[in-house]
Amino acid sequence: SQQGEEDPQALSIQEGENATMNCSYKTSINNLQWYRQNSGRGLVHLILIRSNEREKHSGRLRVTLDTSKKSSSLLITASRAADTASYFCATMIYNQGGKLIFGQGTELSVKP
Amino acid sequence: ETGVTQSPTHLIKTRGQQVTLRCSSQSGHNTVSWYQQALGQGPQFIFQYYREEENGRGNFPPRFSGLQFPNYSSELNVNALELDDSALYLCASSLGTGPIQYFGPGTRLLVL
């Protein structure tokens, strides 16, 4: 079963606009990560935020984590056509062998 | 590029057959995790191998089995293939049960 639910399922924006994706999860976590997947290929790690952190930045990415609401958001600023991909949040629960539990993903389309 | 390789890239099998998928981990990584990703879904954890031993298993039947070799490469074997086994199979390597996993490009399996 999926741990996370992502919202929206699909997002279409113009180049230069900001894109915000949200993720909710069900159980206590050690950390939450965001991954990107181009056209059904392998996933690429974008950013990790630990359960004791509230916000983290990496280049054009900003991630927030609210453990009281069990939710996270990923903001991509000044989007580019090359950002077109599926984005997944993933949580890790260490007493379950360090496995990643993925949400269903947000499909982002950035139009030039 | 993550340095994780998978073979083959595509595979077509018929129901009831058996299949073996292969993964070479990134240099220095001693943990391999396998995931199944159905079309339009997030990856689902199958199992993880750490230093040649199974270190956690997801909700998959025993006909899904695996191996990890002394060089930390890994195999995923699926017996008695079913139509629902059609999916993208992803392997990911990491150092120990560290949080960040590095994914290969995947093997797309079609069961007819």
Image: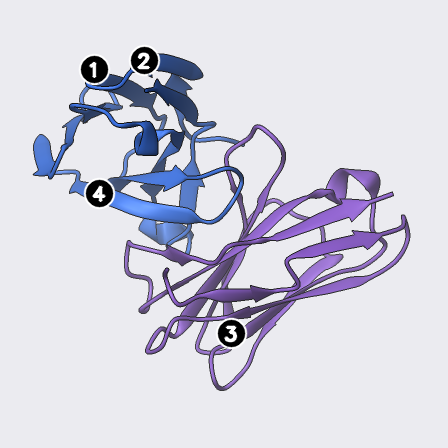
Colour scheme in use: by chain
* Res. A79 image quadrant: top left
Chain containing mark 4? A
Label 1 with label 3: CB-CB less than 8 Å: no
Q: Which of marks 3 and 4 is in front?
A: 4
Separation of marks 1 and 3 at Cα, in angstroms: 47 Å
Q: Which of marks 3 and 2 is in front?
A: 2
Classify mark 3: helix, strand or loop: strand
Classify mark 2: helix, strand or loop: strand
Q: Which chain did the image draw in purple?
A: B
Chain containing mark 3? B
Q: Residue A17 carries which label?
A: 1
Chain containing mark 2? A
Figure label count: 4
Q: Which of marks 1 and 3 is in front?
A: 1
Separation of marks 4 and 2 at Cα, in angstroms: 22 Å
Residue annotated with mark 2: A13
Q: Residue A47 carries which label?
A: 4
Tell me the amino acid under the disc marked 4.
Answer: Ile
Q: In the rendering, at what x and y percent does residue A8 appear?
A: 38, 13
